[in-house]
Image (spheres, rainbow, N blue to C red):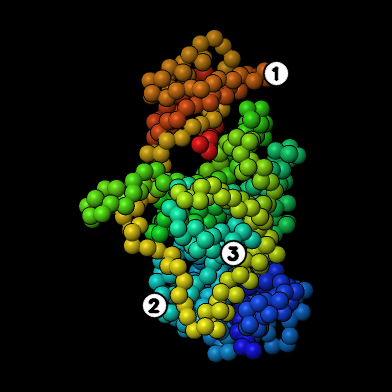
Amino acid sequence: METVNLGLIGGGTVGGGVIRALRRNGTLMTSRLGVALNLRKVAVRDVKKHRDLALPRGVLTDDWSEAVNDPSVHVVVELCGGTTVARDMVLTALKLGKPVVTANKALLSAHGPELFQTAARHGANLYYEASVAGGIPIIKVLRESLVGNRIVSLHGIVNGTCNYILTRMKLEGIEFSEALAEAQRLGYAEAEPSLDVDGHDAAHKTGILASLAHGFWVNPRAIHTEGIRRISRLDIQFAAQLGYTIKLLGVIKTIDGGPGKRRKEARENAPRIQVAVYPALIPNGHVLASVNYAFNAISVRGDVVGDTLLYGRGAGADATASSVLSDLADAALDLKHGSVERVPCFVAHAAQSRVMPIEEVTSRYYLRLAVIDKPGVFARISSLLARAGIGISSIIQPEGHVGDTVPVILMIHDAPNAAMQKALRQIARLGVVRDEPVLIRVEPFE
Ligand code: NAP
Ligand code: HSE
């Protein structure tokens, strides 16, 4: 029986989950793969910290280079996070020709091209199933299972922390800060929680998915990113009254175009792709509206398959460990069969594609204003929108609000983001409008 030795860096939430999962199902994996997986080294920052890992003597170290450079280590697993030392760890391993497994979406987002080029140059695969949506096997699905499809659209709830916060605010009416503290306690949140709540973690994941779906590396700077800090309980309640649920979505859409035959034609016809992360109102009848707490879900529409949906736990030790184990199996089989051939991530036909700036994208909107309650207010707001060519589908002034200002909700027809932002700035300057307007996109899923 062949044995594949693992050098694991990180013994925290995910690393601990992987160690426990290997203990639980290592024998099962051996029987399925014909290869035994053996933890040779586990590197952590502080070896004195109490942890319930029951590792054999000599395995735990505080020197990550042991987990990478030890000649008996065949596969390196990076589960420590960050984008600086983690980059060194992964590059060092790949340059030694060792397959690497990582859950680190921030690292991939920041250094993806360099890491994938290094992997290709040194004939070692870089696996990253756990980097997007925890336990959901979306990477393999996009890369392998849907290889016969053009991806028309992808909508993903890919940040467990934000989904947990929005769910608890909606179902239990608790405050944002309380829900965030609980997500941190449960091990869902990143070490730096602004990565979650400001949408950056979802943008890292959405960029990885967009790159796979469209075959070209999507520059993270091209991804329009909004988080959930400005979502209030009031908006969650109004959205519910209108038949919607607010979710933080990663959105990837092919806007138009297709591959032409000649070079110039190909450039002109190359698809424009929308890649963005923002909170959105989802109709309650859509399945994504029912995805609650730390669960993630990704709905993918392919031109051959039609609509598909993947659902599961998007964060936490066990769910994420499951994806790491899947990558370990692939890495072990690479070594067993002496082959690194996989469906390539990036393909020539897509090189001309580009990410569409958000200003050019057309969306529907929910707009909440706090206005002084006096005659003529609606007329002034709607005339500004009309002048910008923006149509209102409904105006609601919820009853029962007293005070200096009252809330007004406008549901707005499809409008280019640039035109909407310009009109919004004009509306915000009206003397009758108090507080900053709240604008949230509506995803109709047509
Ligand atoms: P974590 O609980 O903070 O664990 C990080 C581990 O890395 C700790 O064991 C830490 O050691 C170790 N470490 C940090 N710097 C090190 C260094 N220089 N050398 C050696 N060890 C070092 O983090 P996590 O939640 O497991 O997340 C790990 C990675 O998985 C991140 O990239 C994260 O984005 C990703 N991820 C997390 C989840 C999740 O649900 N948590 C889900 C999917 C992906 P000490 O224990 O001694 O501090
Ligand atoms: N912080 C991330 C989340 C962990 O909440 O989704 C999983 O990637």
Residue at the spot x=48%, y=75% of the render? 125
237 over 269 or under it: above or below: above
Residue at the spot x=56%, y=79% of the render? 333
Instruction: Answer with left or right where residue 374 lies relative to residue 221.
Output: right
Return the residue at label 1: 400
Residue at the spot x=45%, y=49% of the render? 303
Marks 3/2: CA–CA distance: 23 Å
Quarter of the image where the N terminus is located: bottom right
Disc 1 versus disc 3: nearer the observer: 3
- Cβ atoms at labels 3 and 2 below 8 Å apart: no
Mark 1 Cβ inside 8 Å of ligand 2: no
357 over 208 or under it: above or below: above
Percent from the top left, x then y, of residue 291? 66, 46
Return the residue at label 2: 121
Residue at the spot x=70%, y=40% of the render? 169
Q: Which amino acid type is marked by label 3?
A: Ala
Mark 3 Cβ inside 8 Å of ligand 1: yes
Disc 1 element? loop
Marks 1/3: CA–CA distance: 47 Å
Disc 3 element? helix
For residue 328, which quarter of the picture? bottom right
Disc 1 versus disc 2: nearer the observer: 2
Marks 1/2: CA–CA distance: 66 Å
In this view, the residue in front, 422 or 4, is 4
Number of other residues with Cα within 10 Å of mark 2, as a class: few under 14, some 14 to 19, many 20 or more: few
Return the residue at label 3: 130
Report whether residue 301 is seen.
Answer: yes
Percent from the top left, x then y, of residue 290? 67, 42
- Cβ atoms at labels 1 and 3 below 8 Å apart: no
For residue 397, which quarter of the picture? top right
Number of other residues with Cα within 10 Å of mark 1, as a class: few under 14, some 14 to 19, many 20 or more: few
